Amino acid sequence: MIHIALQKELTAANGAMQLDVNINIEPGQLVTLYGESGAGKTSILRMIAGLLQTDAGLITVNQKTWLDTKKGICLKPQQRKIGFVFQDYALFPNMTVKENLLFALEKGQNKEIVNELIDIIELGDLQDRKPINLSGGQKQRVALARALVRTPEILMLDEPLSALDIKMRTKLQDYILKVHKQFNLTTILISHEIGEVIKMSDTVFSIENGKIIKQGKPIEVFTTKQVSGKFQFSGEIIQIEKEDIIYIVTILIGSNFVKIVAEEDDIKAIAVGDNVIVASKAFNPLLQKIN
Amino acid sequence: MMDWQPLVLTFKLALVTTLLLLVISVPLSYWLAHTKSRVKPFIETLVSMPLVLPPTVLGFYMLVAFSPANAFGSWLNEYLGIQLIFSFKGLVLASVIYSLPFMVHPIQAGFSNLPSSITEASYVLGKSKITTLFKVLLPNIKPSLLTGVVLAFAHTIGEFGVVLMIGGNMPGKTKVASIAIYDEVEALNYDVANWYSLILFAITFSILLLVYLVNGGYLKRFWK
């Protein structure tokens, strides 16, 4: 169990902001921090990592205390076992891909994990290249692999996918999910893409002005009406076309386009660029007792 | 007849000064690049002073401070057995102070230009500050280090005022090339002065050219 309580006064774009959050995470969960930029998401990650001081706070990770301002405990970033994937990747330019991974090894740690990660994240062809010769998506994969070398207790990713195109993004989401399961990680992801949050996370914390305004299963947090659909996906409206008396709405779900028929009433509430949920209730199985 | 001793002394001085400066400047620049302390502007000003101060001012105060006739100078002499006036040690100390900005500025700029995330990335990977400095930061500011080393070296070769004030003009001990040139001109030996000058000109030109070639990546292109 991971318990995080943090308080800090931050200077945001529009004046001072009081950050005050309380987060509980079950081991093995993947949670997202969702919110506008400037809401305090990155500050939360940095405080968990020990890169930013808190005014008051308590962090316990699997019965170990990382931070307790009341008792004066504050572990250095080096002493907290975390994997951190930075927004700008933060690869060491002087080292090759493999050297970046080897650097992350702890004293006396078996080197086998490096080769294992190179296999899992498919870095074999890139391992002797310097970061300057990698694309954004490749750098991101290296940063992810490097963060996993120490087998962290918490893996944290600061908007890891925001700079990537949709195809690369989908691929990387799959890598993150794969390592999250394979290494049985507890993962905190920052994202401002609803689709990504719904696809990736068990729990989402929606953050506004330094406070958690909603938390829970992504689908429940993002839909105001309860939909009891069995098949549901979220996507972005790309186009709304009128055909006779009905409308055809084109929605981008992941990297696929889906066309949905809508009536005039449905159209009133939505516009191009909106995030929507596409759900179907058509396949409801019925249960009946056999005499 | 040209005497090689002043030239040898000049390069010995430049070498010792540069090595000492490197040892001093790396931690100092690191501190200046990262500190939020209020004394930072004062330290920065002190480091930069030799850029604008006439070298004779610096030399004069050092001469006064280290003179055995004064308290500090006599203390140094009595308890540590160091005489800094008119000695090679004094020249080294004066040169270190005089060339400090030439070493500190490029290294400080190098540290400041590195994204802070790579330092943080190293910390969250469990690496200490020292490991981070030597394995991550310094290897990534090699061009700045090279610039600092070369500028400090070349600047020490070009010293005149400070050296003359604190070192005097003692053959084999404190008579460096720049002073030898002045000496020969005074004695109307233009021929010898010309040789010293030519050699200094050629060497400093080559050193600076090498830096620009290396830092501009011209040599790499050539090798490939």
Image (cartoon, rainbow, N blue to C red):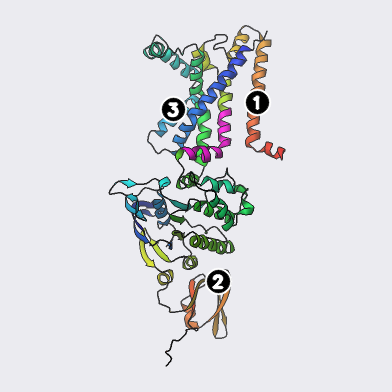
Q: CA distance from mark 3 to mark 1?
A: 29 Å
A161 or B170, which lies in front?
Answer: A161
Q: Return the chain for callout 3.
A: B
> Looking at the image, can residue A70 be seen?
yes
| Residue B88 spot, x, y in % from top left | 52, 14
Examine the structure image and report whether residue B122 is included in the region drawn in magenta. no
User: What residue is shown with label 2?
Assistant: A252
Q: Residue at x 41, y 65 (%)?
A: A204
Residue sitting farthest toward the left: A70
Examine the structure image and report whether residue B149 is included in the region drawn in magenta. yes
- Prevailing secondary structure class for the magenta stretch in the rendered image: helix
Element type where label 2 sits in the image: strand
User: What residue is shown with label 1?
Assistant: B205
Mark 3 closeness class: few <14, some 14–19, many ≥20 residues within 10 Å = some
Task: State the extent of the magenta-drawn residues as a range.
Answer: B130-150
**Same chain? Circles 3 and 2:** no
Q: Return the chain for callout 2.
A: A
Mark 1 closeness class: few <14, some 14–19, many ≥20 residues within 10 Å = few
Query: On the rendered structure, is A33 left or right of B140?
Result: left
Q: Residue at x 51, y 37 (%)?
A: B134
| Residue A179 spot, x, y in % from top left | 51, 60
| Residue A61 spot, x, y in % from top left | 37, 55
Rendered-image quadrant of the N terminus of chain A: bottom left
Identity, as a three-letter code, of the amino acid under mark 1: Phe
